[in-house]
Image (cartoon, coloured by chain):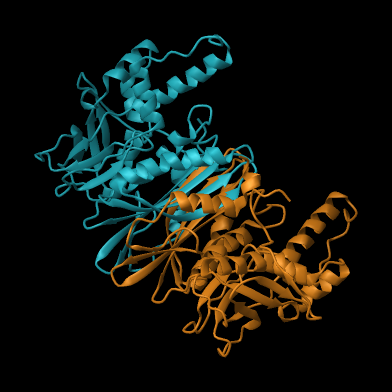
Chain colours: A orange, B cyan
Amino acid sequence: MRLSELGEFGLIKRIRAKCKNVSPEIIEGIGDDAAIIKTGAKKILVTTDMMIEGTHFDLSFTTFSQLGHKFLAVNISDIFAMGGSPEYFFISLGIPQKCKTEDIDELYSGILKLAKKSGVTIAGGDTCSSKDGLVLSGTLIGTADRIITRSGAKAGDGIFITDTVGDSAMGLILLKSQKSEVRSQKLKNKKLKFGTQNSKLIKKHLMPEPFPMKNMSKVTSMIDISDGLLIDLSHICDESKVGALIYTDKIPVSKELAEAAGTLRLNPVSLALKGGEDYALLFTAPQDIKTDAFKIGEIVKRGRFIVDEKGRKRRFQAEGYEHFKRK
Amino acid sequence: MRLSELGEFGLIKRIRAKCKNVSPEIIEGIGDDAAIIKTGAKKILVTTDMMIEGTHFDLSFTTFSQLGHKFLAVNISDIFAMGGSPEYFFISLGIPQKCKTEDIDELYSGILKLAKKSGVTIAGGDTCSSKDGLVLSGTLIGTADRIITRSGAKAGDGIFITDTVGDSAMGLILLKSQKSEVRSQKLKNKKLKFGTQNSKLIKKHLMPEPFPMKNMSKVTSMIDISDGLLIDLSHICDESKVGALIYTDKIPVSKELAEAAGTLRLNPVSLALKGGEDYALLFTAPQDIKTDAFKIGEIVKRGRFIVDEKGRKRRFQAEGYEHFKRK
């Protein structure tokens, strides 16, 4: 069978079925943002993320320092999504011949700057040569007293999001159009101009800044937006065995995204729903919770619906980025 | 600076200097087989290993099941080398388009068979698409009561090795010659014949079987043979700030290696000293220790020497496999 028929999530399901959890110390294994290991009194969270040149990043878009930042940021986001604190980071690098020592230094400078800011210690890893592109694989270990999984959402809960979404996807579109413009030499002798607003979107794509929830005591389930709001909300619905209702006019869209989407005649809400890599936190909690987060809908018993600004209701699928699937 | 000037170990040194350990809970960070984290009463070991197609494996030599076995085996070996028990394995895969679902199933069957045998639980990971070759990145978490690092060797200790060395390197030579013979079509219509002895060497390369030390109470330092005996012994000397003296006629060489090397006019002792990926354990301990392991030399205050069968002494360098270095 081709992997393109199965898709990333089909593959994960298949792997999960094979690797049935047999250890009583593993509270959660495959299928959440991080695995949970209970050892003594403390709970330990472990997350791994792989970034491959040509799949996850393009070295003509990003500096090595920005890449290092993002590499740690996506791992931190997974630990935050479980309600934990990031602690120890392990870095495995597959380095192609084209990379210079200075490039690796720059990569580490980006990692270390964010590590310092986030209280993360670089504790180990592996370095080897890669025949083709650059490969980064990180394992971040965190700790938590109370852990929030994807499986606790209950009908009646509100659905909340901590930040605007779709900015990163628009940032990537801008970077790609910038590259094709450079390629077509339209701007060969001009310095590329990007307004401050576009820079903000691009920065959101290249250097996402995950931040933790402040008060999680009432939160019932949580995930970070990595593949896209609809996919990630579907993960919560799958694991919690519930449905969801979201309102398009409640989805927080930044001024910058609205403007750039207007110029490029794209639908900003569609980008907000399907664009990935925002690393905002999507969570469910009782509707009367005190929070700065945006309430975008409610958990229902069954069915997954989007309600548009005219009150029209349509079912949604888990649309967003999925590895292996044909577009 | 080119990475080929710095080499893998130069790069690790550079990274280690950048990532100074600031956390009191990290007992050992970068630079040993695994990192050690103390949490509550238990010590937790973490090791990561990356395997990249074209660098670490050739899919025309190995089946996916053998590859899965080796992928977990090299990680288990790192945990054994610290005196620990392997517990939880996290698997990140970068999968190219050419791989079918059945290939990934086979890969997991190899991992799971060894996991079951070794008491390891598959606890999570990441799957994504790779533009070029297959990439495997594993993180294995182990536990230990007493941990054995590379830094405890003392002048006067014996140097021991748990198994024959050089077999894996010879296995790889046989696989490569097999491939070039197939390529040159000399054997196009013949079924390739490999004697039982050669099969043993090839199996040692494709499916290494790490095993733990039984009684480690007197062991002062330990490492697994992954890069080659001389390199790995040099790591112990570096970390313990001691010298070493080893005797070529004490190095355990298998009958199979001796015969294959004879046929190919290669020096079996040179393969035993410089060939990597044997995953035997190299350790130091008081000379009167009761052990089944082979004693190959002694730790001395300073200097690193090989004594040949005629009693001639020459200095040795850390020769073996090092990523990035030009050959």
Q: Residue furthest right?
A: A186
The residue sitting at 43% across, 51% down in the picture is A19
When the figure is inspected, residue A261 is found, relative to residue B28, above or below; the finding is below
The residue lying toward the viewer, choosing from A306 and B271, is: A306
The residue sitting at 51% across, 9% down in the picture is B190
How far across and down, in percent of the image, does residue A45 sit?
Answer: 42, 66
How far across and down, in percent of the image, does residue A41 sit?
Answer: 30, 72
The residue sitting at 61% across, 69% down in the picture is A233
Task: Tell me, yes or no, if residue A102 can be seen here.
Answer: no
A45 to the left or right of A202:
left
The number of callouts visible is 0
The residue lying toward the viewer, choosing from A280 and B246, is: A280
When the figure is inspected, residue A190 is found, relative to residue B323, above or below; the finding is below
How far across and down, in percent of the image, does residue A313 sit?
Answer: 75, 75
A280 to the left or right of B327:
right
Q: Where is residue A283, by image quadrant?
A: bottom right
